[in-house]
Image (cartoon, rainbow, N blue to C red):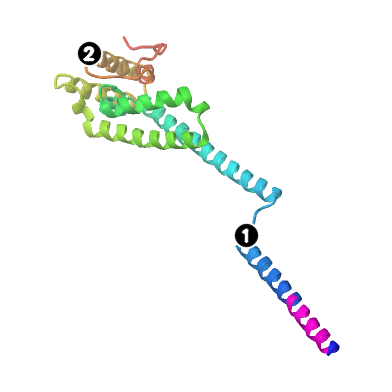
Amino acid sequence: MVWIALAVGAVLGLTAYLTIRFLRWSSDHLTRRRAPALPGPAGRSSAMLDEVSANTMHRVAALRAVDDLKQEMGALRTDVVWTITNSALWDVDVPASRTFFTALTVWDDHHATWRDNETVGAAAELKVLWKAAKDTAIRLGINHLSAGDRPKADTAIKLVRKAASTDSDAERYQLMAKAAQVLSGIMSITIPEETLRVIEQEDPPPALPR
């Protein structure tokens, strides 16, 4: 009888041992399946570097976009015919132009201290406002000027175009001088300084016809 009791005890002990091992294995297996994979220090550093690199690239692209915008604006300021024809672009009494130039001033004064996402957002907004200001100026055209000033603007445009087509320095100087005189009599027009410098040449050519 003793050996039977010992055999039963051994079987029960083995069963309990196997049950405990199975429960532990099940618990560990489920924990490994449920637990998220956490990156190590190297993984976290790599992800952070990638994010910083992407943000830097976006900032650089935003700065380049605003520089391109300013170059386009500078080119238009030295295009005398375009400036006269679409003078509303430079007139801050026009809401679209006022909004753009206000935003551009804020950009120039503060973008160096902005975060990357703020810089990207402001650059995108500037592009939209610039297009709106240009589209408005083109739509208004010469009609932006007062009725009495429109014929004078047409005369100035013809003089500038004729000056651009002549090979004579003396004639070009005289035509541009006349255009400047006509423009000075247009009270409802806004002319950027760059445009005036193109029109008002500092020195006449050495030999003018009498």
Marks 1 & 2, CB-CB < 8 Å contact: no
Hey, which residue is sitting farthest right in the picture?
3
For marks 1 and 2, the one nearer the N-term is 1
Residues at marks 1 and 2, CA–CA distance in whole angstroms: 80 Å
Main secondary structure type of the part rendered in magenta:
helix
Q: SS of the residue at dot 2?
A: loop
**In this picture, is 37 found above or below 152?**
below
Mark 2 sits on what residue? 185
**In this picture, is 21 found above or below 208?**
below
Whether residue 165 is visible: no
**In this picture, is 1 found above or below 145?**
below
- Residue count near mark 1 (Cα–Cα under 10 Å), binned few <14, some 14–19, many ≥20: few
Residue 153 spot, x, y in % from top left: 22, 22
Magenta highlight on residue 99:
no
Q: SS of the residue at dot 1?
A: loop
| Range of magenta residues | 4-16
Between disc 1 and disc 2, the foreground one is 1
Residue 90 spot, x, y in % from top left: 31, 23
Pick whichever, 39 or 9, lies toward us: 9
Which residue is drawn at the image coordinates 39% and 33% (left, top)? Answer: 126
Q: In this view, does 12 lie to the left or right of 78?
A: right
**In this picture, is 159 found above or below 3?**
above
Amino acid at circle 2: Gly
Location of residue 197 (image quadrant): top left
Whether residue 103 is visible: yes
Which residue is drawn at the image coordinates 67% and 45% (left, top)? Answer: 45
Which residue is drawn at the image coordinates 59% and 41% (left, top)? Answer: 52
Location of residue 170 (image quadrant): top left
Mark 1 sits on what residue? 35
